[in-house]
Image: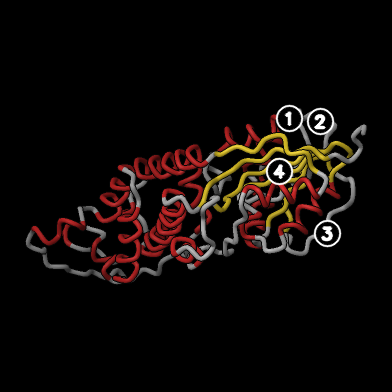
Amino acid sequence: MLLGSHGSVRSVLFKNPLSLVRFDAVLDSADSAMFDRLRFWWYGYDPNAVARVEAEPIVEETVDVAEEPVDRLALSQKIWGPGFLVPGGVDYVMTMVKLFGVNPAMSLLDLTAGLGGPSRHVSQFFDVYITAMERAPEIAKRAHSMSIDAGLGKKVPVTTYDPETVELKSHAFDCAYAEYLTVSVVAKERLIREVSKALKARGQFSFVDFVLADDGDLEDARLEALRKVERFAPVPWTVKQYTDCLTASGFDVRICEDHTELFMQHVNQGWKQFVEHYDVKLMTRGSQMAIAEEGELWMRRMTALQGGVLRVYRFYTVSTYGAIS
């Protein structure tokens, strides 16, 4: 590992100045005291104050020890919690599914399993079987292993799927839910119709996602910057596009509420606890770079939200199939 004077992480970052500049530029764009703390934690000093002090000589030391491959999924869980890859944790996913009135006789569909943490908690809490699906193959494989390790391999199996082309079994589920999925799905209408088809009579569908603000522009520079770092490029709809599509697909939209501020609070909380509990200087260089990239991704998401081009909305719907007319 590369170390600077007094064991500083600075020389590690200077080995990749582009990463340093990009990460710091994103930090500059965020309007949050918490992210100032993240900046100080990351660099070990205030990078904006460099011009006011005499720079210390940078001495690099090389240790002839091969670094282990970076476990990005493990690093993400350090931010969002065991089994989680997105903000909110157990409490938030429970607010989504409690509306379903879940009981052990029901069958649930999770369209964004991630590492399976949310659905494993729901399954244990309600003693219910959940079909969990994840679009990233390596994440789905890890999630299924975690379900097996937790003794839930049969109650919460995790499989890979493509939301652009998936064909779901008709009338197979009582409820379905998803977090931050459809924003990056091009064939949104097709996916929503598949979910509608997969639900039983009066089935319920709850999801939270990024939406394009009413006065937002798909060509906004902040969205373009976000697309450069997202694994699946965001192509957000407006709230009206969602409600129109849901209605046309056979759903009665019961709840459509802005969760932007709550989402940003959850992001802040995740990074805050990470800063307080982990020391980047003790991580390998590869892990440090991975954290920098993760930080940049979340800074760009926050920039789009704070700038007003994106919002976060939660939808709760009930299928009109089987309703008495």
Kind of residue sitting beneath label 1 = Phe
Instruction: Check disc 3 and give the amino acid type.
Output: Glu
Residue position for label 1: 126
Tell me if label 1 and label 2 are in contact, CB under 8 Å: yes
Q: Give whichever of discs 1 and 4 has the lower sequence position.
A: 1
Badge 1 density bin: few <14, some 14–19, many ≥20, Cα 10 Å = some
Question: Of discs 1 and 4, which sits in the foreground?
Answer: 4
Residue highlighted by disc 3: 167
Residue 188 on image: x %, y %: 71, 58
Q: Position of residue 262 (x, y in %)?
A: 50, 37
- The residue identified by callout 4 is 177
Looking at the image, is mark 2 or mark 4 earlier in the sequence? 2
Between marks 3 and 1 in the image, the one whose residue lies nearer the viewer: 3
Tally of marks: 4
Mark 3–mark 2 Cα distance, whole angstroms, equals: 25 Å
CA distance separating discs 2 and 4:
17 Å
Task: Give the amino acid type for the residue marked by disc 2 in the picture.
Answer: Pro
> Does residue 119 sit above or below 194 in this rendering?
above
Q: Is residue 56 above or below residue 144?
A: below
- Measure how far apart labels 1 and 2 are at the Cα level: 6 Å
The 10 Å Cα crowd at callout 3, few under 14, some 14 to 19, many 20 or more, is some
**Mark 3, secondary structure of its residue:** loop
Q: Earlier in the sequence, mark 3 or mark 1?
A: 1
**Residue 287 at what x, y percent from top left?**
41, 60
Residue 70 horizontal side relative to residue 18, left or right: right
301 sits to left or right of 323: left
Residue shown at the point (29%, 45%) measured from the top left: 37
- SS at badge 1: helix
- Residue drawn at (71%, 43%), measured in percent from left and top? 177
**In the rendered view of the protein, which quadrant contains the N terminus?**
bottom left
Indicate which disc residue 104 carries. 2
